[in-house]
Image (tube, rainbow, N blue to C red):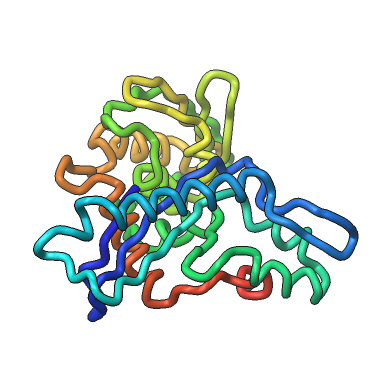
Amino acid sequence: MFFRNTRLNRSGDYGVIELKRPNQSILGTYSSKIIVPSTSLRVAQQQASQYLDSIQRGQFLNSDDFFVAGNRKHAFIILGQSSEITQKCQSELHRLQFQNILPAGFHLYTYDELLELFAATVPPTIQVLFVAPASTEPQQVSKVFRITWKGGLHARPSAQLRTTASHFISDVFVKRDNARINANSIMGIMMLAAAQNTEVEVTAIGIDAQAAVETIGKLISANFFMVDDAPGWRLIRSQFDHLLEHSGTLTPEKRNQ
């Protein structure tokens, strides 16, 4: 994905976003003292470099409204999970190697880091007000819903669902086929890969289970309050404009803060 920064007061920032899979590895080990990029990370870096070179030779930088002099190019690689980095970079030597594992202008972000950014930008959509049931005995309520939003359960709808479920005391679960996940995990909801017209079963267990299932059902029926002129990529663009202002590869210590 090509992007061009229009928010910062710098002329000519541009770059690419290279998306890999969340279950792919980031690091390999050459020896007990040396860590190296995984095959997935090396391939992502090579592909991003090729895209940047083709953009530089292409129409984007030759257009009349693009200031060519002093261009700054960036490549954001989205890959893997931060837990792998924490596990493999426990020594100071490994942490120093990781800080320099990518060339200048390349930024690595894991999926869980990116989804935390999504979650922080999604305000609660539904304010839930209900009278506590007379009985404090937990109950279990399940209902099947059809995903009608054309984008399915991608990042923003998943964040909306997680935010809505968090309003309730009950534990909420979402199931598709044989996969069942807790609704407090955006990553888990996305991993269900529930596309448009997919049926999912929502189950709540607790004293407010009925209200939880009914409210989430309304959220799904309302297409997660998504509109055609605000697709998920717009949120990605705004996030990466923000990241450009604070660009730099995160160290394992910062990831744990």
* Residue 206 shows in the view: no
The answer, for residue 187, to whether it is visible in the render is yes
Q: Please state which of residues 159 and 66 is positioned toward the viewer in this rendering.
A: 66
Q: Quadrant of the C terminus?
A: bottom right
Residue placed at 52% from the left, 70% from the top?
104
| Residue 178: quadrant of the picture | top right
Task: Locate residue 171, reporting x and y percent.
Answer: 55, 43
Q: Residue at x 53, y 19 (%)?
A: 177
Comparing 46 with 195, the one in front is 46
List x then y, in percent, for residue 211. Answer: 39, 40
| Label tally | 0
Q: Position of residue 116 (x, y in %)?
A: 48, 59
Residue extending furthest toward the front? 57
Toward which corner of the image does residue 196 lie, by quadrant? top left
Looking at this view, is 49 or 182 the one in front?
Answer: 49
Could you tell me which residue is drawn at 52 percent across and 35 percent down? 191
Q: Is residue 103 above or below residue 53?
A: below
**In the picture shown, does residue 215 fall above or below 111?**
above
Give 208 or 134, whichever is nearer the viewer.
208
Give the residue displayed 33% in from the left and 52% down from the top: 128
Residue projecting furthest to the right = 32
How far from the left and from the top, in percent, is residue 173? 53, 36
- In the rendered structure, the answer to whether residue 229 lies left or right of residue 110 reads left
**Left or right of 253: which side holds 68?**
left
Question: Which residue sits furthest bottom?
Answer: 9
Q: Is residue 40 above or below residue 148?
A: below
